[in-house]
Image (cartoon, rainbow, N blue to C red):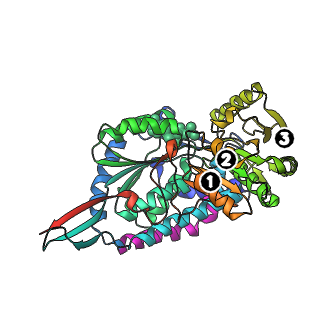
Amino acid sequence: MSGACFALKFLDTILHGQSSWMARDGAHALSVDDPATGALIASLAITTKAQICAKIDQVSIAQALWAEMTASARQNILRKWHDLAQKHEGELAALLTLEQGKPLSEAKAEISSSLKNILWSAGLCERKNGYEEKSHINGALNEVHYEPVGVVAAITPWNFPSAMITRKVAPALAAGCGVILKPAEDTPLSAIALAKLAYDAGIPRGLFALVITNREGAAEFSDVVFSDKRVRMVSFTGSTAIGKTLIASSAQNVTKLSLELGGNAPFIICADADLDKAVEGAFASKFRNAGQTCICANRIYVHADIYDVFMERFVARVRAAKIGNGFEDGVEIGPLINERAQQNVQNFIKKLDSEGAQKIYAAQPGLTWSFLPPMVYACAEDCSATQQEIFGPIACVYKFDSYEDVVQKANETDYGLAAYIYAKDSKLSTGLAKALQFGMVGINETRISDASIPFGGVKQSGIGREGGYDSLKNFMVTKFICKA
Ligand code: ADP
């Protein structure tokens, strides 16, 4: 059976008996397309405003009951969710490739990290919440409690349709919160599958509610959640532009925010770097998910001493990459998600060309409209890529001479999510890592995302951290009680 058929069969079992997800009327339907072929995968019913409000009512009621349960009861249910998702690991990965386009190997890695997000959150359920100590007042006791924030609205992007959901929903549930989730309009199917498995595991439908919208409906969803005082927190992963609108909306009811926004990652290759590792690292970081991740290498800085040899080997690596449908064996670069993404990257290329950036390599033009050939550009210091998040398979390489200068250049951005350094000298790499104004730095490593690490950025790359030991606390509020 082909990968696409396997995914469609799974989708059929997920949707079977859940007719509420299917569109009944074309006017209120969201079409989900395969980005590799343009074929229609599913037509889903768009959640109406009245339904969103009703779902918030349900989450609010269910959350109060859920928060009363013991931590170990919540943990058991989350573990069941993990086990069920693990049982369907292959199908979830295939569905992800079908609706998102990324190579199946990347989809499998994403599902594996999604499973870890759930298990990690389940594991944290029993961590001691709060502490007590002798009070500042004679004879009294000070108690600090961490309580669930309450109803959480989660808004997730299309580039990691499964990992971003599990990284928000699992710790929120573990903390005792209820969640109303709005996945990206391009990739709602992974969300439906994860929700169905969660319900099968015993997570109440009312507690973890799902909203399906098109692009216009996304703004309506945020209007509803920010105007409802029962929604105490919004956790968002997406662009800085939309993040800023959410910050403005949060003023209405002083809603707590957790934001993981755009990035502009510098990838610094020092003169003493292991070139094999640097070339492979730069390739993986730049072209993972066809360049559509917020931690992708956006600016590749190469020391002048090794620039020529790096360029030659990097271009050879890009030339060797197979482009195509994510289900095909050996494919490393899949399609872009949609026409809007395609247009954004085309505009960026025009800008690069007009600024005189030198095109060193471009693969053969794509298979269909949605495949953009990977390209490598040699850029001057003042090239616009320095400020813009590319979000496509275009590698921009810069030459540098001094480490002081490269740190300064790397920091000259409004973003501050991820940065990478390749160097053998650990004193040099540690010094650079400390000087870089970014939330996460990978030294000789690009796989910096995991359930166990605090993922997030500084500056306009966001507020708060997801994952790591504090992932539950992100969804909690602190209460102090003085017992005299
Ligand atoms: P991209 O441009 O890569 O799609 P976005 O930040 O626009 O990134 O989208 C990320 C998520 O934010 C998606 O789920 C999308 O539907 C949602 N979104 C888009 N506009 C709004 C909005 N005005 N309010 C709330 N969510 C939005």
Q: Mark 1, mark 2: which one is toward the viewer?
A: 2
Residue under circle 1? 96
Q: CA distance from mark 2 to mark 3?
A: 34 Å
- In this picture, residue 232 sits left or right of residue 320: left
Residue under circle 3? 363
The quarter in which the C terminus is drawn is bottom left
What main secondary structure does the magenta stretch of the protein show?
helix
- In this picture, residue 377 sits left or right of residue 12: right
Residue 277 position by quadrant: bottom right
- In the image, what residue type sits under mark 3? Ala
* Residue 349 forms part of the magenta stretch: no
Q: Earlier in the sequence, mark 2 or mark 3?
A: 3
- Residue 282 percent across, percent down from the top left: 74, 52
The quarter in which the N terminus is drawn is bottom right
Q: Residue at x 69, y 28 (%)?
A: 347
- In the image, what residue type sits under mark 1? Leu
**Magenta segment, which residues?**
72-93
Query: Which structural element holds mark 3?
Result: loop
- In the image, what residue type sits under mark 2? Glu
Q: Residue at x 31, y 55 (%)?
A: 150
Name the disc covering residue 355, or none. none
Q: CA distance from mark 3 to mark 1?
A: 26 Å
Work out whether residue 189 can be spotted. Answer: yes
- Residue 118 percent across, percent down from the top left: 49, 65
Q: Earlier in the sequence, mark 1 or mark 2?
A: 1
- Whether tag 3 and tag 1 are in contact, CB under 8 A, the answer is no
Q: Residue at x 72, y 49 (%)?
A: 287
Q: Mark 3, mark 1: which one is toward the viewer?
A: 3
Residue under circle 2? 404
Q: Nearer the viewer, residue 221 or 90?
A: 221
Q: Few, some or many C-alpha atoms within 10 Å of disc 3 (few <14, some 14-19, many ≥20)?
A: some
